[in-house]
Image (cartoon, rainbow, N blue to C red):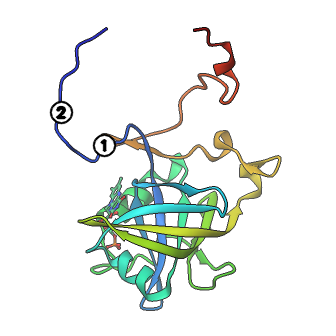
Amino acid sequence: MTGKITLGPMPYMSVMPAVLVGSNVKGKPNYMTAAWATVASMAPPMVCVAINKVRYTAQGIEENKTFSLNVTSSNQVIETDYCGITSGSNKDKSGVFTSFYGKLGTAPLAQECPVNIECKLFSSVDCGSHLLYIGEVIEIHADENSVTDGKPDIRKINPIVYAQATYFDVGAETGKAFSDGKKFQQ
Ligand SMILES: Cc1cc2nc3c(=O)[nH]c(=O)nc-3n(C[C@H](O)[C@H](O)[C@H](O)COP(=O)(O)O)c2cc1C
């Protein structure tokens, strides 16, 4: 056993996805990079993302009550980082990706991203600096070549993984979920 040290409170999570939050702000698509995004509920399907109150994106979500989470691929690091260091309040980011719209009509979806999660705002929780936006998933749009047996395929998507101010891709498989645990012996 190694000894433990305390590092103090911080918003830490081991790995995070780098996704693009799409929203229409003043009628124009805007994409913002977010790492603080995850699943919130299975039934109904919901995802959530923590967005700083000062972000231009927050204005768009409040305006339309819709947003998208666009899953990025490892060959999109430059565009992804650009959307994380540039604010739509200073620079028009509508041309970074080709936008299309799904069922909701107001959540822009990035054509170049392998998977687009189209969300209707369910609720927002004021956590302090950030609002946790919880969205009901209305539709998943996926590139044909990123899907296997009707589900997004991580190997084909090759999503960007974010940790420690660095982008990684997905590493090697280390086991089978909901299965390997059966081998455990007390
Ligand atoms: C890798 C990365 C992850 C980020 N994650 C978040 C996040 O989860 N929440 C957030 O509010 N800002 C996050 N940011 C910062 C925003 O993407 C950045 O402030 C962006 O310029 C905001 O765009 P907007 O003003 O057009 O909405 C992240 C930036 C980077 C580079």
Amino acid type, residue under disc 2 in the picture: Leu
Q: Position of residue 54 (x, y in %)?
A: 25, 74
Q: Is residue 130 left or right of residue 138?
A: left
Q: Is residue 40 visible?
A: yes
Q: Which image quadrant for residue 63? A: bottom left
Q: Residue at x 83, y 46 (%)?
A: 149
Q: Position of residue 182 (x, y in %)?
A: 69, 18
Q: Is residue 116 left or right of residue 13?
A: right
Q: Residue furthest right?
A: 149
Q: Which image quadrant for residue 16? A: top left
Q: Residue furthest front?
A: 186
Are the residues flagged by discs 1 and 2 in contact, CB closer than 8 Å?
yes
Q: Nearer the viewer, residue 14 or 88?
A: 14
Q: Nearer the viewer, residue 90 or 139?
A: 139
Q: Name the residue beneath numbered marker 1.
A: 12
Q: Residue at x 52, y 76 (%)?
A: 121
Q: Secondary structure at mark 1?
A: loop
Q: Is residue 50 left or right of residue 150?
A: left
* Precedes in sequence: disc 1 or disc 2: 2
Amino acid type, residue under disc 1 in the picture: Tyr
The crowding category of the residue bearing disc 2, from other C-alpha atoms within 10 Å (few below 14, some 14 to 19, many at least 20), is: few
Q: Position of residue 13 (x, y in %)?
A: 36, 41
Q: Name the residue beneath numbered marker 2.
A: 7
